[in-house]
Image: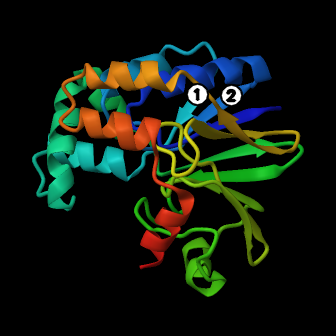
């Protein structure tokens, strides 16, 4: 059994399309979408692409979906001020059925992969879609977030950087980001079963950046440059998160 874990797409449809080509070539049996499909420059189209897949897909929500759903419900925003316009814009792009479907996504998904055992998928941690930890975060700070987890393997995302580490007896993998990586340009994801493979898919960055710039996304030019053509480095973000 082979499962693809795709996280943090952030409306980057060109990156997703390239990853799905690799997913099909790999002959996966199912896909887990680990949250933060939105916000981003092509949210409606990205969701439609995932919903139309011929491969079975399971979704869980990330903090991006939580923020968009709160906006749609008219709740007071907890999103930092610089990002509120992006949340509002993304929320307005979604079809009513997409909004209803997203509201039903759970916070975690559990899948039994024969060669790996039970695998728990979450966005940031099993208890929160906003907690931040990296490969450098001390174990004593991460362990409480995994308290009560009885799966030997946990898959997370949220920080957009792949890693493989142990927290007590639990192996924790970060799938990286399909649409907004920190590190070398491209799209990052995980292939699970029979072993663990960290995957990096290359795609036509110039064409993708051009497609993004043609959208009405409020920060389209910045997304094209900083998230596709010249992403922030892993070290930059490790330093930022440590602060």
Look at the image and tell me in which quarter the C terminus lies. Answer: bottom left
- Which quarter of the figure has residue 219? top left
The residue that disc 1 covers is 57
Q: Residues within 10 Å of mark 1 (few under 14, many from 20)?
A: some
Q: In the picture shown, does residue 153 fall above or below 53?
A: below
Q: Residue at x 78, y 23 (%)?
A: 26
**162 lies left or right of 33:** right
Q: Residues within 10 Å of mark 2 (few under 14, many from 20)?
A: some
Pointer 1 with pointer 2, Cβ within 8 A: yes
Q: In the picture shown, does residue 208 fall above or below 84?
A: above
The number of callouts visible is 2
Q: CA distance from mark 1 to mark 2?
A: 6 Å
Looking at the picture, the colour scheme in use is: rainbow
Q: Residue at x 22, y 31 (%)?
A: 217
What is the secondary structure assignment of the residue under circle 2?
strand
The residue that disc 2 covers is 30
Residue 27 visible at all = no
Look at the image and tell me in which quarter the N terminus lies. Answer: top right
Q: Nearer the viewer, residue 237 or 12?
A: 237
């Amino acid at each position: 059994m082979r499962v693809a874990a795709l996280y943090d797409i952030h409306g980057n449809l060109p990156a997703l399309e390239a990853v799905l080509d690799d997913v099909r070539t790999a002959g996966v049996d199912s896909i887990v979408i680990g949250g933060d499909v939105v916000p981003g420059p092509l949210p409606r189209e990205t969701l439609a692409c995932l919903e139309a897949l011929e491969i079975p897909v399971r979704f869980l929500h990330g903090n991006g979906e939580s923020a968009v759903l709160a906006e749609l419900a008219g709740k007071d925003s907890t999103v930092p001020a610089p990002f509120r316009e992006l949340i509002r814009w993304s929320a307005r792009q979604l079809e009513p059925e997409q909004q209803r479907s997203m509201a039903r996504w759970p916070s975690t998904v559990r899948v039994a992969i024969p060669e790996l055992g039970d695998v728990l998928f979450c966005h940031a941690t099993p208890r929160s879609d906003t907690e931040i930890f990296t490969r450098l975060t001390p174990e004593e700070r991460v362990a409480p977030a995994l308290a009560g987890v009885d799966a030997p393997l946990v898959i997370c995302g949220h920080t957009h950087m792949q890693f493989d580490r142990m927290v007590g007896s639990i192996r924790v993998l970060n799938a990286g980001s399909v649409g907004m990586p920190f590190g070398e340009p491209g799209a990052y994801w995980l292939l699970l079963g029979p072993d663990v493979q960290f995957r990096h898919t290359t795609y036509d960055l110039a064409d993708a950046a051009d497609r993004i710039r043609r959208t009405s996304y409020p920060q389209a030019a910045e997304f094209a440059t900083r998230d596709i053509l010249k992403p922030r480095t892993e070290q930059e973000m490790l330093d930022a998160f440590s602060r």
